[in-house]
Image (spheres, helix red, strand yellow):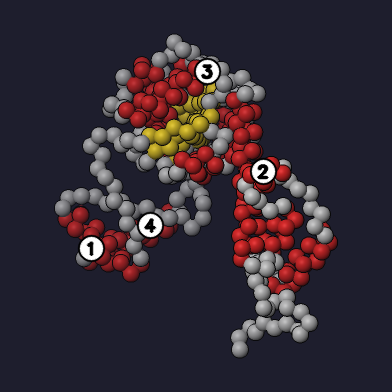
Amino acid sequence: MNSPVFDSESTNRNTGKIIPLYPLTYNLSQNVIRQVIENGLKEVNEELEETLPNYILDEYRLNDINKSIHNIHFPKSFEEYNKAKKRLVFEELLIMQLALLNLKTKYSVNKKGIEFNKDVKMQDVIEKLPFNLTKAQTRVLEEIDKDMESDSPMNRLLQGDVGSGKTAVSIVAAYKAVKSGYQVAVMAPTAILSKQHLKNFQNILSEFDIKCELLVSGISKKQKEAILERLQNGEIDILIGTHSLLEENVVFKNLGLAITDEQHRFGVRQRTTINSKGESPDVLVMTATPIPRTLALILYGDLDISIIDELPPNRKKIDTFAVTKGMEDRVNNFIKKQLDEGRQCYIVCPLVEESEEIDAKSVLELFEKYKEVFNRI
């Protein structure tokens, strides 16, 4: 017998009933944790203070807190366990929603926001774009424009697939902020994405005499000091960077708009930190992660939601496949076929741990590997 579980004749703590299984650490056993939980419940003696009002308990048919805490650990039936779980999950979601709504109220009701200049027309920069906006982009920009011209702080989540044109929308919004006399912060999760944004912003906004700058780890101390000085003096209109923007010594003269890309890589606290660098700046957060609307309302209850649900014309449908390691040869043959037909391929190397910089060694190793593979096929 491997790892037998047994009880004495007088008890049945570990057999003959529904047994809780806890995550273990520091060599603690299930027996020890069960005993500690049991002792804790006896100590509390069903005198935990109820956190939900009676009308909510009645309306949603929820157990009281003491019964739920007991039955989540030591239920007599799975029906009791499920009722306890329902109560505790309900309470957790309710508290999170109330906290997010409280945040939203603080932003939109209790704080007066920036009224950006109504005479600064987004259309002026839209007409200079090297492409036509989609109807979805135009609709979203109308929502953003309305928010920016109101006296309540904008807090908007912009959701759209990769290639749907979120960056173009953010550039137009940044133009309105700068031409209204304010600075813009654009925060991205990696140095590479930050550099890409800098190039896109400069390509479109340079002819409007809007100065963009990059702040990422890796730049020299002298460069960084010069950037921070010009930022505080108001000589930089748009600062684009990574988590470096959150540092205490990054001081804006007049921050009016904070844009966060790939929102799922940042938390509410980081969003709050960047916002605190201005006086109630407008906030635009962007994500390409598909989030069902109901879930988005739960996760981002402090934000209004805009969705770009249309790709620019002539964008081909993207097919996504997940394959196992065993299909590597088949994938390589597929790539070779595409190359023979004159197409190109790019390979994204996953990082072992989150970093602003690419692990050059792993990229070079993969480069050598594929060079050998495709020379051989």
- Which dot marks residue 333? 1
Residue 363 seen: yes
Q: CA distance from mark 3 to mark 4?
A: 51 Å
Q: Which residue is mark 4?
A: 364
Q: In the image, which is nearer the foreground, mark 2 or mark 3?
A: 2
Q: In the image, which is nearer the foreground, mark 2 or mark 4?
A: 2
The answer to whether the residue labelled 2 contacts the one labelled 4, judged by CB atoms less than 8 Å apart, is no
Q: In the image, which is nearer the foreground, mark 3 or mark 4?
A: 3
Mark with earlier residue (3, 4): 3
Q: Amino acid at mark 4?
A: Leu
- Which dot marks residue 56? 2
Residue lying farthest top?
Answer: 119
Image position of 370 with respect to 187: above or below: below
Q: Secondary structure at mark 4?
A: helix
Q: CA distance from mark 1 to mark 3?
A: 56 Å
Mark with earlier residue (1, 3): 3
